[in-house]
Image (cartoon, rainbow, N blue to C red):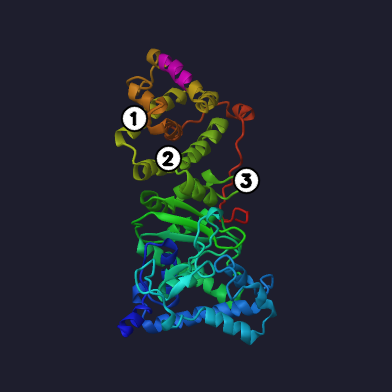
Amino acid sequence: MGDRVSDEQHRLVLTAHPLQRVGAFAFAALARARTPDAVTAEAFAQTVERMTGDAVRAALVRDSKDPAGYSLKCSRSFFPNSKMNHPSSAKKEATTLSGDVRRWRQSPDEATWPEADCVLCGRRAVGFFGKSDVPLAESDAYRNTTPRGHEGTALCWPCLNCFYALPYGCRLTGGPSIAVHSWDDRFLAKTTDRQVDENRRIFELGRDTLGPVPAREGVALNALRRYESRVTAGVDLMVFSNENRGPSLEIYTVAQPLAEWLRRRAFGDAYGALLRAHRTEKASGRVGLARNAFREPERIVRACARYLAGPAAGRGAIGPEAPALAGLMDTFVEEVIGMDHNDLAEIKATARRIAARLYSESAGKLNSFYVQFRDQRRLRAWLQHESVHWVLKPADEETGPLVTTRGYELLFSPGMDGQAWFHRELLLIAVIEDLYRRGWKPDGAEEVLNNLPTDPSLPDGDEEDNDGSNQ
C-alpha cells in the first residue's frame, strides 16, 4: 500500500483546473517530457529540485527592486508571503533563508498527511495549502483566503508542484500574469513548452529577458499564430494575480472556430491588410485584432469595413488589397459566425447592384452612400430613394430590384438575433470589393477628399505587439 501511494505522489495527472493544467504542462516541459504523464519518477524528483533551486536563488536576492530581482518580484503574485518573498527574509542569513525555502518546497512527512483526498485528482493529499502555495480566488470579494476554521485546500504532492511550476508556463509581467489555456492538450503542450523556454532564462538569471510587457490578448494571438496544427478546442486567456493587495482573475475566451480561423488565416497579404484595418494611433494592428477576437469578434468585420470604405469614399480610389480582405471576411462569416450561405449570397447580390448604381457616378456618390451608411435610418431612406431610381433606370447587366425583401430584412430587421448591424458591415465591404473589381476610378476624387471627415490614420507597418501600456 505504502509503495503504491509513494509512486502516485511522483506521477503527474491532468485535472479539470485550468491553472493546474498549465502548470502540469510547464512541469513536463521542465522535465523534458512530451506530456505530463510521460514524466518519470526520477525526472519528477529532478524537476522539483530544479524549481526549488530557482526559488532559493530568487529569495537570496532579497530586494525585488534589484536588477536581478525580477523573478522574486513575480513570485509575489503567485506565492505571496511564502518563505521566498516574506518581508522577514531581508534580515535572515543566507543559509537560514535557503533552508527555509527548501523546507517550504519539501514534501510533508508521510506521517503528517491528512486523511483527505486531493480535491483536484482524488489521490491521497499530503497536506492542506493556502494562498502562499496556490492561486485560489477570482476576485477581492473572495479575499483569496481559506474559510475560518478550515486548514486549506487538500492537494497531493504532484498537483501542488503543478502550481509551483505554473510561473514557468505563464507570460510574466511583474504584475498580473498571463496564462494561455485550452482543452486541446496538443496546443496547450506546444504553447506552454515555448513559454517555458522563454521563462527559464528569467528564473536562471533573475531578470526579465522577454522585453516590454505585451498586450494580454496579443499573447494568446501569438500562441495561435505559432501553432502549426489544427486547434480542436477553444482558447482561454487567463489574466490573474494572487498578490495580497488585490487577487484577481480575468478570463477571455475564443471558441474553437475563431481560434482555428485566427491560426489558419494569420499569414499572407490579406492578414497584413487585416492588421492594418485594426491599427490605431494607440495600438498596433495585432493588439486591435486580438482584443476584438477575445472580446467582440463581430467587430473584426466592422474594422475591415471602415478601413476599406473610408479611404475609398474619400479618395475615390480603392486599394488593391480590397478583394483579398473581402475574401478573408467571407471566410470569417462562414467559418466563425456560421452565417447561412444563402443569406451571405443575398447581401453580396445587393452589394453588387449598389456598386453597379455607384459605378457610373462621381466619388461624391460613394461618399454620400458612406455618410448615410453610418446611420441606419438614413441608410434605409437612401436605399428606398435609390430603389425607385433603380426601377426607372436599372444597370444594364443587373436584374431584379435594388434590394429584395429578404435583403431588406437582413439589413434592418430588429430581430435576426441582433445581427442586422453586422449584415450592414458586410454589405459595405462587398460594395467596395465590387467597385474595385469594376475598376472604379471616378473624377473629382480630390475635391471629395477635402470635405470628407477623416478617420484615425492607419499606417502600413505593424511590427509591434506591445500597445505601450503596462497591463
Question: Looking at the image, is mark 1 or mark 3 earlier in the sequence?
Answer: 3
Q: Residue at x 70, y 79 (%)?
A: 91
Front residue of 170 and 352: 170
Question: Looking at the image, is mark 3 or mark 2 earlier in the sequence?
Answer: 3
Q: Residue at x 35, y 55 (%)?
A: 233
Q: Is residue 137 above or below residue 386?
A: below
Q: Residue at x 45, y 76 (%)?
A: 30
Instruction: Give the residue type at disc 1.
Output: Glu
The residue where tag 2 is placed is: 326
Q: State whether residue 53 appears in this view.
A: no
Whether residue 338 sits left or right of residue 440 in the image: it is left
Q: Neighbour class for label 1 at 10 Å: few (<14), some, many (≥20)?
A: some
Q: Residue furthest bottom?
A: 95
Mark carried by residue 346: 1
Instruction: Tell which tag, 3 or 2, sits nearer the viewer.
Output: 3
Query: What is the magenta range?
Result: 380-389
Front residue of 356 and 191: 191
Front residue of 19 and 96: 96
The residue where tag 3 is placed is: 281
Q: Position of residue 392 (x, y in %)?
A: 39, 12
